Image (spheres, grey):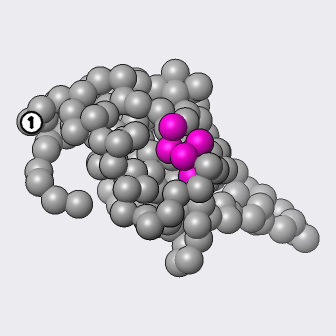
């Protein structure tokens, strides 16, 4: 709405969007953050759902820089608190930005294997791991809450069922 008001003013220039991804509405109060091709800060996709009592974020990108941009986009949609961040799996490109949302008060949620594998399996596939890579891996935020098969998270008027399914 703010961008629409700005664009309606004569001579006004719309504010630039995020540099690491684009926001795509996917349903009522649900948004995908689609990574820009080749961007190393976002790499994978993320998203968020806005309920009446808070926000649920799905994945937090690879870096805090991209996560801060995601937070800024969420703030354009709502001032509601960010209650939950759900990590879909343990790869760093999906949880590297978790610390940004933890500082906002969000609870990080994942299947129990994500907590177990975040620091043991990330980067294992590389032939050589630099000290900088090790430091990044060791600084990854671990989930606060884990589940085995599934969990239901409440956002006031919305319920989010998070289910475990094998795969990437």
Magenta segment's dominant SS is helix
Residue 139 in view in this figure? yes
How many numbered marks are there? 1
Q: What residue occupies the far bottom of the structure in this picture?
A: 37
Residue 118 x, y percent position in the rendering: 37, 41
Q: In this view, does 43 lie above or below 59?
A: below
Rendered residue at 53%/78% (across/down): 37
Q: Is residue 130 above or below residue 111?
A: below
Q: In which quarter of the image is residue 146?
A: top left
* Relative depth, front residue between 138 and 168: 138
Q: Tell me the magenta residue range.
A: 133-138
Which quarter shows the C terminus? Answer: bottom left
Q: Is residue 92 above or below residue 147?
A: below
Q: Quadrant of residue 25?
A: bottom left
Q: What residue occupies the far right of the structure in this picture?
A: 11
Residue 157 in view in this figure? no
Rendered residue at 50%/44% (across/down): 137
Q: What residue occupies the far front of the structure in this picture?
A: 128
Say whether residue 93 is left or right of residue 13.
left
Check if residue 166 falls in the magenta segment: no
Residue 122 x, y percent position in the rendering: 39, 51
Residue 76 x, y percent position in the rendering: 62, 45
Circle 1 sits on which residue?
149
Q: In this view, does 93 lie above or below 95?
A: below
């Amino acid at each position: 709405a703010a961008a629409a008001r700005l664009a309606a003013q004569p001579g006004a220039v719309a504010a630039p969007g995020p540099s690491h991804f684009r926001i795509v509405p996917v349903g009522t109060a649900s948004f995908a953050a689609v990574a820009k091709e080749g961007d190393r800060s976002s790499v994978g996709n993320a998203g968020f759902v806005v309920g009446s009592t808070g926000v649920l974020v799905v994945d937090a990108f690879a870096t805090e820089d991209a996560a801060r941009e995601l937070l800024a986009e969420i703030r354009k949609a709502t001032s509601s608190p960010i209650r939950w961040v759900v990590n879909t799996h343990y790869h760093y490109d999906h949880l590297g930005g978790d610390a940004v949302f933890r500082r906002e008060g969000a609870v990080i949620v994942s299947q129990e294997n994500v907590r177990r594998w975040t620091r043991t399996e990330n980067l294992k596939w590389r032939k050589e791991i630099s000290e900088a890579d090790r430091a990044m891996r060791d600084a990854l935020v671990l989930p606060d809450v884990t589940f085995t098969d599934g969990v239901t998270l409440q956002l006031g008027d919305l319920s989010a069922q998070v289910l475990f399914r094998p795969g990437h």
